[in-house]
Each structure stands twice: as structure tokens, then as C-alpha cells.
Amino acid sequence: MATTAAQAIPTASVAQNFPATPSVAMSICQTWVMLVAFSVSPAGNGTTSVENANGSVHDAVAEAVRIVRDSGLPNQTDSMFTTIEGEWDDVMDVIKRATEAVGKYGSRVSLVLKADIRPGYSGELTGKVERLEQAIDEMDEYQGHS
């Protein structure tokens, strides 16, 4: 007997984690601590800066990163993304302000978001990496690597 997609979903566990109505779900999302990795950059006609006519976007990105850092929320920037941790409304407000700041550098803005929304967890900006490093260390010990 074939299993349908509806039968394959464990509805009891889904119901525990995701409320039935969108309004309830959104109010819960607003209190969940989340990680959002985002990249924002100007596009289209415009100038990246008065002094920098070579097409680099570092001045625009620097303004966005300054807004994130001034927010007081935990954050981390690498060569591709800035990751920020906090409650939904706080994180989205910072991303909105960063995007608006970048907008003055071009006629359009490119914004990429990736979110990890996990109820009951905080401190994941560093916690996820710590658990990964621990797993690698344990794997190395098991396999005899030093």
C-alpha cells in the first residue's frame, strides 16, 4: 500500500511546533530568537562612492554592516554574509535599515536572506559552530587523527 504525502507527515509533532492559524504563527515567530544571514549590495545605475569609481561595493556594504553592529544584536560578518541573531522584529528592522542605507548607492538593491528559526534556542551564532567543532574533534579522535 502506497503512503500519501499527507500520511507521511507526523501531524502531532507538526501541530506542536507550528500553530494552526497564521496570526498565531506570526505572533510566535515574533518572539522566536532567530539567526539570519544576509547579503545586501547596490545594483543598477548609481555610484558606489564619490572616491571609489571602480565598481566596488565596499562603501555601501560598510554602511550596512555599521548599522548591524550599532544595533547591539549579536552579529558576525564574513566575506559573503553578515549574520545577526535576535527576535524576528528586531532582526528584520536592522535588515530593513541596512537595506535602505545601501539603496542610496544604486538604482536597485540586491538582498539575499537565509534564516534559521528554531524555537527554544538562543546563542546559536556561536553555539552551532562550537557543536560543529566538537563533532569534528570527536570524529578526529575516533579516526585517530591528531
Image (tube, rainbow, N blue to C red):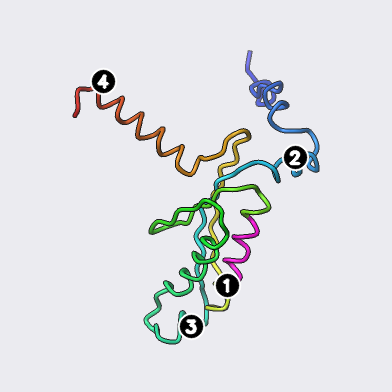
Amino acid type for the residue under numbered disc 2: Ala
In the picture shown, does residue 138 fall above or below 99? above
Residue nearer the viewer, 99 or 106: 99
Asked whether the beta carbons under mark 3 and mark 4 sit within 8 Å of each other, the answer is: no
The magenta stretch is 92-101
Q: Disc 1 to disc 3, how far (Cα)?
A: 13 Å
Asked whether the beta carbons under mark 1 and mark 3 sit within 8 Å of each other, the answer is: no
Q: Is residue 97 magenta?
A: yes
Q: Disc 1 to disc 2, how far (Cα)?
A: 30 Å
Asked whether the beta carbons under mark 2 and mark 4 sit within 8 Å of each other, the answer is: no
Which residue, given by chain and number where applicable, does mark 2 sit on? Answer: 25
Q: Residue at x 56, y 47 (%)?
A: 115
Horizontal side of residue 17 vs 141, given as left or right: right
N-terminal label among 1 and 2: 2
- SS class of the residue under badge 2? helix
Rendered image: mark on residue 86: none
Image coords of residue 106 (percent x, y): 54, 78
Residue nearer the viewer, 39 or 45: 39
Q: Residue at x 52, y 64 (%)?
A: 40
Which residue, given by chain and number where applicable, does mark 3 sit on? Answer: 47
Rendered image: mark on residue 101: 1
Which residue, given by chain and number where applicable, does mark 4 sit on? Answer: 142
Number of the front mark, 1 or 3: 1
